[in-house]
Image (spheres, rainbow, N blue to C red):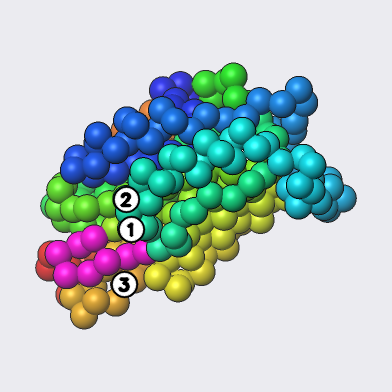
Amino acid sequence: MKGFGRNKVGFQSVLGLQRIVFLFFFCGLFLCCKPKKAMVGSDRWDVEQLKLKSESHSDTAKWDLKLYKQDIATFEKYAEALSIYPLNKTPFPVAEYDYAVASTPITVKVKNYLFKGVRIGEYENPESEVVKDALTLLVLTNDANAEESTLVESRNFPYLTAQGFFKTADNKFDWVFSKSPDGFSTLLFNMKLFDLRFGQTIVIVPQKDKSFVYCQINDSPENYKNQEEFNLSISENSKIRDLLSRKNTIGN
């Protein structure tokens, strides 16, 4: 899908309007490493390959010191802005890698309800414009200006990782995502764990008592011609409509 998250950075931040200036500086400073040869994230890795990659990250002789120093210098400037996430983001050294990640914010309307969300994925290769979706997260906010933020990280290659938060009128939801190249991926949302092998689309419906209900859908935006067709499928989903009809759902 062309045009989806084309800013190929070491990690990418999708922020509210109040952080747009930070976004431009931040994304411009962190580029992917490009060694002579690397396996892209969409390829399947076996346990032995993962072990070798883990060992290379722990080998001080293989660290990309130029990238490490660049990260340290940038974090000195933006440490406070990065501290807003569920897991504090600080620099660490890694072996050279060639990997590009992507995220894009989305909104979906279902009747009079408004969901804000994010799509997380990885490029088929760093020169490609094709993104493979790994997670679609939707949270009912009923507010187009509700604060949300996402940080997607490439430094853990070959693992895809991301984190962020959503704020509703009277609640905050934190989330952390991890995808392993051996096919296992999880989303931890306010301590609720989702095994994404059974569906990459997670829909969260906050309740008036500050709890939340949810559904997991075995579907993805990349199965549709465009985002609008995916949004239509969400709006027509009977499970989501049932959750929205609950008396305790925010907005009811």
Residue 232 shows in this picture: no
Give the label, 3 or 2, closer to the camera. Answer: 2
Alpha-carbon span between mark 3 and mark 2: 28 Å
Mark number displayed over residue 84: 1
Q: Which residues are magenta?
A: 167-175
- Image quarter of residue 20: top left
- 136 left or right of 178? left
Residue 205 shows in this picture: yes
Q: Which amino acid type is shown beneath numbered disc 1? A: Ile
Mark 3 and mark 1 residues within 8 Å of each other at the beta carbon: no
Q: Position of residue 19 (x, y in %)?
A: 24, 42
Q: Position of residue 50 (x, y in %)?
A: 79, 49
- 236 left or right of 216? left
Which numbered disc, 3 or 1, marks the residue that appears first in the sequence? 1
Q: Residue at x 40, y 63 (%)?
A: 86
Q: Is residue 233 above or below residue 210?
A: above
Nearest the camera: 251 or 9?
9
Q: Residue at x 32, y 30 (%)?
A: 24
Mark 2 and mark 1 residues within 8 Å of each other at the beta carbon: yes
* Residue count near mark 2 (Cα–Cα under 10 Å), binned few <14, some 14–19, many ≥20: few
- 63 left or right of 179? right
Kindly identify which residue carries mark 3.
212
**Label 2 SS:** helix
Alpha-carbon span between mark 2 and mark 1: 6 Å
Q: Residue at x 18, y 53 (%)?
A: 146
